[in-house]
Image (tube, rainbow, N blue to C red):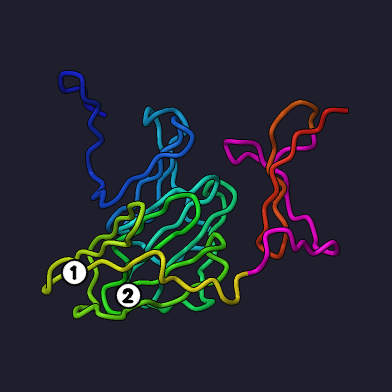
Amino acid sequence: MEIIGHLQVWHGIDSRSICSMQDSILFVGTQGSGIYKSIDDGQSWVAVSNGVASTNFRAIQAEGTTVFAGGQNGTGVYRSLDYGTTWNLLSNGISSSSYRGFASNGTIIVAGSTSQGVFYSLDNGDNWTQINQGLLDLNVFDLDLNANYIIAGTHSQGVFRFPLSELSTTGIKDELEINENRKLLRIVDILGRETIPTTYTPLFYIYEDGSVERKIITN
């Protein structure tokens, strides 16, 4: 690490994307070196690529306690529910491709690929729907959301928008529908460290069906 003025510079890694979670937690997607995580505002970094086949990540997005990372061609969108400790490649409705853009607003997550256009999910990435109506270039470089539209920046045809009011909610699982027989995989704290139940501490219970519950035990 080198100090230049007020900047702290890390040399030797080609960093392509970055996102923050809960203020002090940072994730960086690199070209050729996978994903890195910092829990101290970037003072130190560790590689977190367990379960990841891609080494190139040009898009990364945190949504609540979930992290999405867009891998290289032949892979797709990866998701971590435990602060980057483990990753799973998503496939339910979303295509294999290279992904360069994400956007989210707490309700919807959208992903833009370099060959398959735009996909959206209303259930934290469990299910995806492709929306390319009117999109003249399926090579999407970046995405954004406002109160009314999904906005997509493309490689050769400019910027497109899609009304949020036209999104379909068909097939989305009710958030209140919980499988009582699901198996608990692990419990982690807000930094993603595996732990045991502790009173008056917010913890995340991760289940084998991909669901996550935030609990605070008071007695």
> Which of 13 and 129 lies nearest the eye of the viewer?
129
- Identify which amino acid the numbered label 1 is placed on: Thr
Residue drawn at x 22%, y 39% as measured from the top left: 11
Residue 163: quarter of image? bottom left
Query: Does the stretch in magenta take in 178?
Result: yes
Mark toward the start of the polypeptide (2 vs 1): 2
Q: Secondary structure at mark 2?
A: loop
Dot 2, crowdedness within 10 Å: few (<14), some or many (≥20)?
some
Query: Does the stretch in magenta take in 60?
Result: no
Residue 40: quarter of image? top left
Residue 73: mark = 2
Task: Give the number of the mark in front: 2 or 1.
Answer: 1
Residue drawn at x 51%, y 76% as measured from the top left: 91
Residue 196 pos. (x, y %): 78, 37
Q: Is residue 3 above or below residue 178?
A: above
> Magenta stretch?
173-197
How many callouts does the rendering have?
2
Residue 178 pos. (x, y %): 77, 61
Q: Report which residue position mark 1 lands on.
A: 154
Name the quadrant of the C terminus.
top right
Dot 1, crowdedness within 10 Å: few (<14), some or many (≥20)?
many
Residue drawn at x 20%, y 19% as measured from the top left: 6
Residue 1 pos. (x, y %): 27, 29
